Image (cartoon, rainbow, N blue to C red):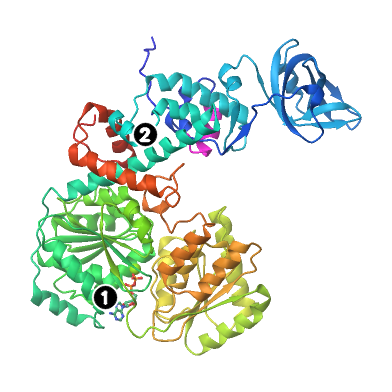
């Protein structure tokens, strides 16, 4: 016997009436898997159908809602061979024909005498008054009908507005009465927010435009509040439980610095000072190291790793790709004394036997510094004594993965590195749980990168320029056009481009290829040859976006540059300008849109990532807030970090106050908040069960 189970918003959406396996697959495409997802699938806009039009009064071309009794319904084969479904409505002032083509099944959905309302664009012609492809609903649909402002949802293929509205209505009816409001009532009153049930009802099927506004206000606050509670919890913990207090050994550090092939810049020294202070302190370090591409973050991280090593601890560094992990591994090897320090590389492409040997050495403590990819996160990776976690985030890892690696030690210190120049206004939201250090400026001897924007007509000239530079001993990147739709197509385009460049354009040069579908070992081999100068021109898909460091590469050509966002273009450009030679960035593009042109102009004009980020925010058209999304925050559905500034401020203050009062969210009115936050952000709260 089936047992009646308690309903919760975390239930699968399949518990909603009418949602079977096929349609749930379709809903998944919209990111809807649970009832809660469904409730948070908010209208994109609304149609005001407040005024019912008399059928006798409607005019050609107007978008109208009419209602009446079905007086006829039938299918007709037209001379063209098409089947027309015609349903005639009569409201006493006139008749209108609802019309569908080749959808014979529509007819079966109507019964004579039934009253319905229909909405669509009216067409008046020799066949009378018609509404082709209308939206309609039966008048017994009480909630839909009584709502006079109708929601319009983002859809996907195989799903109609009418069907989605029905599901959402079911969710509202079945789930809201049993749901607790996750926002404590006392706070809701103080801030002046609508209750959850009312807010969801009004946002989906509003009674008035004003009610929509108030509902949105509540949901915006709620969304921001969750993130801020999670941040506040992390902050609180970080400031409470002691970690490792490292001793900073001057002599050992100085010996390490002397081995470096360069002198540290004042900016690097400053952030190293901040890191030393954190590591020496009793609480675990929680630091974000922000520095533009090429600013020299790696050696700063390595310094922190050396401090851990001097204290008999292991240090782990996680990079987002195998190429990067390998590169870090190589540069670490280059900077340290390999006799006394054992550095290990752990990636997914090691043979099982080798990987096991590496894990064994990590487990026993024989290895001191470990560099790797997500492979480090696997459960069977255990550390002997992990004291420091470095994450070269490059906006690829989320908050979650940070936490996972950290859990492999006993409250180890944490250093996150990012090249994303998040404007100050957003940093608090994205990194509310971290302290921020910033490397300002570049190592000395760098020349500003010269950036040019060229139309595709100038291609020949550009190729000649690249050829001349390579002949002088430089190396070049050529980045293929971005194909977001498919990795396979992206790879294919890269293969073709490399082939053409190799045979037709640069037959006398060594052209290499790097794309995302290549095996890790092959990628590494290509990168190795490029590093050693055996490849002169590297054709790549946008994978080289992240941290590749080949100082002799001084030209980058970005094809179809207008398809990239500013953040991405800036990252790509950062591949060059790492050596002493003059570097060039060539943007090839013929943008059709104004924002596209503005992005390219901004690239030509500005080098500084922070300035570009601010420009981007002003342009506001990329939708890419410099990687905010990739920073592991759930995608915001309704709040907008720029627009909803006041709400954000308020949410931060309320969240911090709440956590200060109730650090484990133990109080009864926090029960559902606790569940939500711990599930969404994977925070381990003592009382969650
Ligand atoms: P990113 O911040 O993008 O990770 P890297 O750490 O890869 O930058 O450094 C970029 C390049 O600058 C590397 O080749 C590195 O060896 C070099 N570098 C770092 N610090 C200095 C310095 N103080 N003086 C000269 N070169 C440096
Ligand atoms: Mg780097």
* Residue 182 locus on image (x, y percent): 33, 31
28 in magenta: yes
Chief secondary structure of the magenta span? helix
Residue nearest the viewer, comparing 151 with 519: 151
Tag 1 residue: 267
Residue lying at the far bottom in this picture: please name it.
472
| Residue 492 placement, left or right of 106 | left
Residue nearest the viewer, comparing 545 with 494: 545
Residue 659 - label: none
Which badge, 2 or 1, is on the more N-terminal residue? 2
* Residue 618 locus on image (x, y percent): 50, 61
- Mark 2–mark 1 CB contact (< 8 Å): no
| Residue 312 placement, left or right of 168 | left
Whether residue 633 is situated above or below residue 541 in the rendered picture: above
Tag 2 residue: 192
| Residue 195 placement, left or right of 258 | right
* Badge 1 density bin: few <14, some 14–19, many ≥20, Cα 10 Å: some
Q: Toward which corner of the image does residue 144 lie, by quadrant?
A: top right
Residue nearest the viewer, comparing 196 with 190: 190
* Residue 442 locus on image (x, y percent): 34, 77
What is the C-alpha distance between the residues marked 2 and 1?
46 Å
> Can residue 3 be seen?
yes
> Can residue 663 be seen?
no
Q: Toward which corner of the image does residue 665 lie, by quadrant?
A: top left
Q: Quadrant of ligand 1?
A: bottom left
Whether residue 448 is situated above or below residue 37 in the rendered picture: below
Q: At 45% from the left edge and 56% from the top edge, which residue is drawn?
A: 625
In the rendered structure, which segment of residues is drawn in magenta?
Answer: 20-32
């Amino acid at each position: 016997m089936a047992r009646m189970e308690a309903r919760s918003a975390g239930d699968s959406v399949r518990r909603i009436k009418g949602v079977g396996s096929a349609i749930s697959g379709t809903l998944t495409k919209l990111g809807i898997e649970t009832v809660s997802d469904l409730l948070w699938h908010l209208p994109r806009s609304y149609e005001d159908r407040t005024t019912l039009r008399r059928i006798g009064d409607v005019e050609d071309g107007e978008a109208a809602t009419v209602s009446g009794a079905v007086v006829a319904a039938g299918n007709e084969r037209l001379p063209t061979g098409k089947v027309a479904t015609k349903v005639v409505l009569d409201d006493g002032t006139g008749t209108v024909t609802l019309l569908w083509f080749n959808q014979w099944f529509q007819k079966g959905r109507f019964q004579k005498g039934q009253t319905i309302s229909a909405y669509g664009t009216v067409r008046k012609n020799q066949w009378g008054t018609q509404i082709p492809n209308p939206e309609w609903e039966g008048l017994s649909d009480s909630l839909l009908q009584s709502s006079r402002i109708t929601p319009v949802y983002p859809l996907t293929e195989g799903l109609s507005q009418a069907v989605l509205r029905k599901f959402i209505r079911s969710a509202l009816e079945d789930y809201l009465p049993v749901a607790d409001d996750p926002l404590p009532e006392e706070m809701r009153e103080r801030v002046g927010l609508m209750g959850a049930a009312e807010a969801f009802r009004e946002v989906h099927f509003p009674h008035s435009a004003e009610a929509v506004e108030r509902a949105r206000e509540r949901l915006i606050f709620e969304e921001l509040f969750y993130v801020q509670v999670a941040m506040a919890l992390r902050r609180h913990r970080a400031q409470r439980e002691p970690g490792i207090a490292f001793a900073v050994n001057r002599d050992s550090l100085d010996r390490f610095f002397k081995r470096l092939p360069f002198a540290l810049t004042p900016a690097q020294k400053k952030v190293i000072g901040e890191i030393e202070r954190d590591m020496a302190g009793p609480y675990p370090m929680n630091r974000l190291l922000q520095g533009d591409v090429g600013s020299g973050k790696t050696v700063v991280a390595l310094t922190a790793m050396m401090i851990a090593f001097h204290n008999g601890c292991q240090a782990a560094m996680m990079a987002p790709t195998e190429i990067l992990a390998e590169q870090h591994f190589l540069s670490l090897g280059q900077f340290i004394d390999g006799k006394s320090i054992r550095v290990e590389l752990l990636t997914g492409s090691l043979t099982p036997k080798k990987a096991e040997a590496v894990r064994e050495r990590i487990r026993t403590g024989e290895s001191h510094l470990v560099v790797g990819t997500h492979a480090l996160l696997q459960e069977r990776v255990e550390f002997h004594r992990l004291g420091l976690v470095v994450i070269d985030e490059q906006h690829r890892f989320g908050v979650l993965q940070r936490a996972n690696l950290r859990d492999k030690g006993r409250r180890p210190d944490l250093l996150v590195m990012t090249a994303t120049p998040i404007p100050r206004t957003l940093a608090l939201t994205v990194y509310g749980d971290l302290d921020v250090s910033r490397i300002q400026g570049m190592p000395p001897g760098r020349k500003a990168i010269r950036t040019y924007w060229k139309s595709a007509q100038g291609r020949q000239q550009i190729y000649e320029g690249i050829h001349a530079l390579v002949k002088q001993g430089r190396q070049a990147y050529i980045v293929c056009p971005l194909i977001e739709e498919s990795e396979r197509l992206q790879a294919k385009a890269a293969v073709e481009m490399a082939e053409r460049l190799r045979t037709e354009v640069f037959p006398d040069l060594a052209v290499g290829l790097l794309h995302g579908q290549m095996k890790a070992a092959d990628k590494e081999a290509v990168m190795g040859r490029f590093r050693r100068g055996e490849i002169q021109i590297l054709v790549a898909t946008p994978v080289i976006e992240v941290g590749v460091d080949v100082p002799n590469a001084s030209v980058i050509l970005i094809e179809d540059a207008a398809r990239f966002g500013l953040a991405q273009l800036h990252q790509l450009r950062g591949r060059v300008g790492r050596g002493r030679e003059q570097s060039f960035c060539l943007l090839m593009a013929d943008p059709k849109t104004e924002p596209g042109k503005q992005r390219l102009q901004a690239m030509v004009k500005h080098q500084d990532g922070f300035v570009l980020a601010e420009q981007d925010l002003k342009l506001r058209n990329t939708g890419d807030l410099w990687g905010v999304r990739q920073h592991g925050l759930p995608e915001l559905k309704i709040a907008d970090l720029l627009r909803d500034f006041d709400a954000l401020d308020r949410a931060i203050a309320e969240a911090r106050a709440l956590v200060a009062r109730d650090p484990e969210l133990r109080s009864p009115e926090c029960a559902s908040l606790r569940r939500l936050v711990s599930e969404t952000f994977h925070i381990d709260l003592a009382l969650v069960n």
